[in-house]
Image (tube, rainbow, N blue to C red):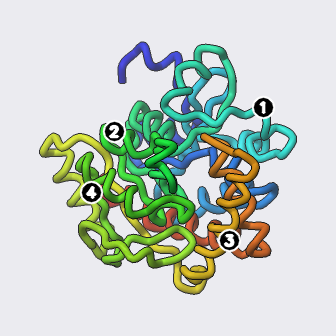
Amino acid sequence: MNQSLIQWLHFSDEVKEAKRTKKPIVALESTIISHGMPYPTNVQTAKEVEAIIRSHNAVPATIAILNGKIHIGLSDENLEWLGSPENRDSIAKVSRRDLAFVLAQGQSGATTVAATMICAKLAGINVFVTGGIGGVHRGAEQTMDISADLTELAQTNVAVVCAGAKSILDIGLTLEYLETHGIPVVGYKTTEFPAFYSRTSGFQTNFSLGSPEELALFLHTKWELGLHGGAVIANPVPEESAMDAKEIEEVITKALSEAHRLNIKGKDVTPFLLDKIKELTDGKSLETNVALVKNNAHVGAQLAVKLAK
């Protein structure tokens, strides 16, 4: 590791030991804790996801910025602080654009998909589990609202295990953007790209692979060839927890209309929509969100174990 990086990185004892013994490590984001789910579900889910990863003999590394340091691996106290409602407004939502500023100012923040990928790569971690990636927002032809997650996937060698792209996005345009930048979209045991809350989107993945061994071989080959950038490992939400695609689309349309009426823009859009969708579905969307993150943790941990070999 570049010695100049050490001043910015703080490894938990568990992650430090995993690196020493070459045990597989799985990165986890923190925006889902601070801005993605309500308390106490956010903290409980974070702990349960970490436990799932440990159950597969891998080590979880939840990533966040605390007092001007990139923390790779968090304590239960850190998770509680990040998830506490009274801290929400004081915790920055950190993407690539914000990372250097938040660190230089000694501030604290929760990392998005893009920032988590950057930090994971700095820490030597190549598998990352999240809920869903950001993408091209609906109406982007007017607003140019495109998530930095996509450009990060084009340049950072980290595999992102997710339940597809968030349903609030324009999934067709998101997939077009990924294709333009040469980012492979691999369906895990599926040929259809999942749409976060639902298993179907009407769009196909580029490839389909059916085991952690196949995923690991694919990623190893990609990076050995010098084909820089990540990959989207699209893992559908379990059938018993999935929402009906038509039903959730109607809810999203209502939520988007409300966001437009209130003139909510930029990085405030996603948390607003997730909260509104939870309200409109009487909490069912939150249950689905929790289920898909846990499901991704199982796949991501298995992938990390195989990739380490």
Given residues 295 and 138, the one toward you in this image is 138
Residue at horizontal 35%, vertical 76%?
A: 192
For disc 2, the marked residue is 156
Instruction: Give the mark nearer the N terminus: 3 vs 4.
Output: 4
Say which element carries label 2.
loop
Say which element carries label 1.
helix
Vertical comparison of 212 with 109: above or below: below
In percent of width and height, residue 225 lies at 12, 45
Residue density around tag 1, few if under 14, some if 14–19, many if 20 or more, within 10 Å: few
Residue 53 in view here: no
Q: CA gap, disc 2 to disc 3?
A: 30 Å
In percent of width and height, residue 46 lies at 66, 55
In percent of width and height, residue 286 lies at 70, 68
For disc 3, the marked residue is 285
Q: Amino acid at mark 2?
A: Thr
Q: Are the residues flagged by discs 2 and 3 in contact, CB closer than 8 Å?
A: no
Q: Amino acid at mark 4?
A: Pro
Say which element carries label 3.
helix
For disc 1, the marked residue is 90
